[in-house]
Amino acid sequence: MHRIRTQTKSINMSTPSKPSPSFPLRLGEGQGEGNQPAITSGKPVREITFGQAINEALAEEMRRDPTVFIIGEDVAEAGTPFKVLSGLVKEFGKERVIDSPISEAGISGIGVGAAMTGMRPVVDIMFGDFITLTMDQLVNQAAKIHYMSGGKLKVPMVLRTTLGASRRSAAQHSQSLHAWVSHVPGLKVVVPSTPYDAKGLLKSAIRDDNPVVFFEDKMMYQLKGPVPHEEYTIPLGVADVKRVGSDITLVATSSMVHVALAAADALQAGGVSAEVVDVRTTVPLDKQTIIESIKKTSRAIVIDEGYERYGVTAEIASVIADGAFYHLDAPVKRMGAMDVPVPFSPVLEDQTVPTPESVAEMAKRLCNKI
Amino acid sequence: MAQPKSKLASKKPSSTLSRDQALHFYRQMLKIRLFEEQVNQLYLGAKMPGLAHLYIGQEAVAVGVCEALRRDDYITSTHRGHGHCLAKGAAVDRMFAELLGKESGYCRGKGGSMHIADQDTGNLGANAIVGGSAGIATGAAMSAKMRGTDQVAVCFFGEGALGQGLLYEVMNMASLWKLPVIYVCENNQYNEYTSYRETTAGEVATRAEAFGIHTEAIDGQDIQLVHATSLTLVERARRGEGPAFLQCNTYRFYGHHVGDIDRSYYRAKNEEQEWKSKRDPVKLFAEWLKKSEMADGKLLDQIEAETATHIKEAVDFAINAPYPDPNEVDQHVYA
């Protein structure tokens, strides 16, 4: 087991491939719909990277449905700077894996128009920071067209992009802006944490009749995890308990799920049993799973890599306060990215994102273990 | 006369309109004219929620272009979009109902004046973001090409949209990929309350030419010219020869929106008068119909009376139509 960075987020490069007391959970329950991969005894489960899982989901959906196509900057032969789309142009040709000019607003708008008229575009926006350039097309067009037309027109478009700091990419290539789009009615927003979830959720996103913004933590593309050969999808709007615990709930998104899991490991050594809830989609938000967990544990920390101020953590903390107030033994705590532009220098950048250590320390405080 | 200059003014293609076609064009233009006059009355009578942006003065553009299209071709429209919707085939009763926020409106009252969409006539929606539909029209054209149909998409926009970057992003791609899209720039000479000359550097049409897009700049008050030019551009796009840019020079007879009455600070009264008296597309075409002996004054009066009755019945329908159930407020957020 090695780590992709030394000090921050601490994402394990490999998620467990066989049952363990902590992860994955819900083994064998409702296989193929919303849960973890089936583990057949004696048969090793295949492990692939997060990036490969995305690639597989796209390839499978493009084979299944001729209206699915990809448009974006350097998506064809280059396969994106992260090489996530490598090989797709070879199978599907340049007509379906379309290299575009550097025109984020333009390709998003073209995606909206194509989606309204019978296609299922997957628009690739290289860095999440660049969704700012697509905002009119996402917020004023894609999100509202179904509603404004009284339910007649639909925009079945997926906009894939990235989030996540600590790649030493500085302020304009490191933000996690999923809260922006989560704020807008009409959009769905996916923030997967594992290769298994990424594949199943992306397939559902492509099949969804609504515009879906799909955020991939660029630091997780090499993260490995079990993904079965068999086809499966995961419905949007179903959270997943990634680890069962009894003293505190760590509600997390995307790579922060791994921070939470690492914190839970550390807490276990100190006698604190932490449950980890991966929300998987911020819209729709599975409030019930979150609330039920906190009713059981009575304490909660919400961890997300977006800016803390007015962020995803605030929304989920409010859901908890509303739904589990009388069960709480401590204030709900929020841990997001620091409210500063992401700095370049490693010594500065590493302070801006929650770490397993900082989450564990907060959890101990809430559980009176310090 | 404040006709925008263009070095690209094209020759007038010879009109081959049949009498039936010509009278249909007249009816369509008159329908838009009387519809919009009724909208203004609804506003003045405080019967319409919100505002509306009247298309009066520009009727020849919408009708001339849309009559060159098939029903399954696409259009995207603007905040000043009633004319485009009607020209593409929308029914006046459901248009009025939408303007009044009624359930029987094209969007169940959820869109209103600036967002009328009607997929049955290929109308992908009016758009209240200036230039906001350029991507949608271009995407629809790309979709048509990918699906192997010969549909064409028309993107209507005013010259105000020339200030928006999205337009240039998608014109670049439309030209690169030879997409069947026609960008129809209606230069009514005013970006809201500001002359386009204060906002637009260089020549309008050369902006599209820079992308290698076939470009025409014409008199938008002449419906025969608009129609004949559009036919050429549409057929060209249908054959796979790529996008076109059609600049139609026109004039907005009323204000930016209903209630924009005091316009003296941005344009002179005598300029308005000159356009209304000499460059009214409906009057010009009526004169041509009479001169070419396709209609006499009596027939034109009869058409006007029929159209007025039709508009009156439609607005009565809309006024009496029920509002949507309040429970609909959170329906159609997601498909």
Image: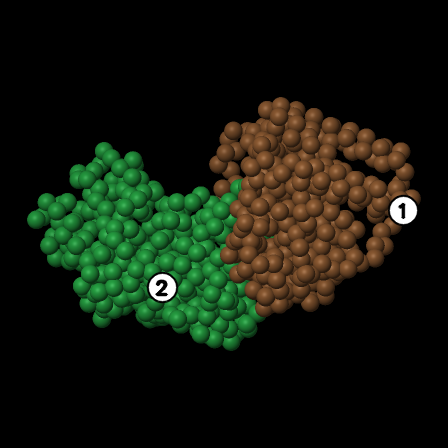
Q: Secondary structure at mark 2?
A: helix
Residue B59: which quarter of the image? Answer: top right
Residue B152 appearing in the image: no
Residue at the farthest right position? B293
Tell me, for residue A195, which label it has, or none.
Answer: 2
**Of residues B144 and B173, which is closer to you in this image?**
B173
Q: Does residue B125 appear left or right of residue B31 in this picture?
A: left
Q: Secondary structure at mark 1?
A: loop
Q: Does residue B308 appear left or right of residue A76 in this picture?
A: right
Q: Chain of mark 1?
A: B
Residue B320: which quarter of the image? Answer: top right
Q: Does residue B202 appear left or right of residue B246 in this picture?
A: left
* Image spot of residue A216 (x, y percent): 37, 60
Q: As shown in the figure, which amino acid type bears the numbered disc 1?
A: Ser
Q: Is residue A72 shown above or below A177?
A: below
Tell me, for residue B292, which label it has, or none.
Answer: 1
* Image spot of residue B214 (x, y percent): 67, 64
Residue B60 appearing in the image: yes
The hue used for chain B is brown
Tell me, for residue A75, which label it has, or none.
Answer: none
Query: How many C-alpha atoms fall within 10 Å of the one at disc 2: few (<14), some, or many (≥20)?
Result: many
* Image spot of residue B143 (x, y percent): 61, 60
The hue used for chain A is green
Whole-number angstrom distance, CA of label 1 to CA of label 2? 73 Å
**Of residues B60 and A227, which is closer to you in this image?**
B60
Q: How is the image coloured?
A: by chain
